[in-house]
Amino acid sequence: MSDSRDAGYYRAWMSSRTVSRRGLFRGLLSSGKQAMEQSAGPSATLLERRVSRPPQAVTEPLFLQQCSGCGRCAEACPVGIISVPDGKASLAIDYAECDFCGACTQACESGALDLSVPMDTGLRPTVLSQCLGRMDDLCRMCEIACPRTAIFFNQQNQPYVDDAKCNGCGKCKLVCYHGDINLSLKRHVSS
């Protein structure tokens, strides 16, 4: 089978296709931008936890691979705050705090929980605006209950949480009898 396209055909085809310098760069940069979004997008979303995990959980992508959903960690938890709702272990600090006993890590055989990972649930407290401690210095229950002194009130009665000290145990939330503390996942994930 012979091709009827010769050098004249290609010369004519190329001369009818003019691209401005701006168009050339726009085309190059937009495809580069798409490639960056495709390569960075999925890995960035995988690193962010959407669900709180038991203490000593490995990084999220590795956790999702290794957690088999066997439920041994949930069975080993003495306070019953670990569950396996969607086939992966998660943590809910609603009625009891995590005392970091390590029973869940010792029960995990899949490697999703690792002794070399620091004890941290990844949860951090947020003090709501109607907190009584903000209005006066009569209530400091969260500050008193924090075993790591990660939460405290400044001289203007404003609460401050030191993320570096906080390990997300949840004692501050549970001791607040007005319900003015919420726990949410921290923004960045340490590796």
Image: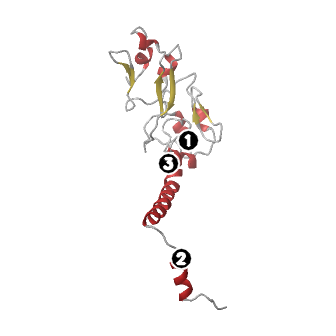
Which is in the foreground here, disc 3 or disc 2?
A: 2
Residue at point 57% right, 49% down? 65
Pick out the residue farthest to the left: 155
* Residue in the image at 52% along x and 44% along y: 60
Tell me the kind of residue under disc 3. Ala
What's the distance in space between the residues labelled 3 and 2, CA to CA? 43 Å
Rendered location of residue 17, percent (x, y)? 52, 74
Horizontal arrangement in the rendering, residue 22 relative to residue 85 (left or right): left
According to the picture, the residue beneath numbered tag 2 turns out to be: 16
C-alpha separation, residue under disc 3 versus residue under disc 1: 26 Å
Label 1 crowd bin: few (<14), some (14–19), many (20+), radius 10 Å: some
Quadrant location of residue 75? top right
Residue with the mark numbered 1? 108
**Neighbourhood count class around disc 3 (C-alpha, 10 Å): few under 14, some 14–19, many 20 upward:** few
First in sequence: mark 2 or mark 1? 2
Vertical placement of residue 38 versus 164, above or below: below
Residue 154, position in %: x, y?
A: 34, 18
Query: Distance from label 2 to label 1 (Cα)?
Result: 66 Å
Q: Quadrant of the C terminus?
A: top left
Q: Residue furthest bottom?
A: 2
Give the residue pinned by disc 3. 44
The one nearer the camera, 13 or 53, is 13
Q: Is residue 43 above or below residue 3?
A: above
Label 2: how many Cα within 10 Å (few below 14, some 14–19, many 20+): few
Q: Residue at x 47, y 26 (%)?
A: 125
Tag 1 secondary structure: loop
Q: Earlier in the sequence, mark 3 or mark 2?
A: 2
Location of residue 66 with respect to 2 vertically, above or below:
above
Q: Nearer the viewer, residue 28 or 118?
A: 28
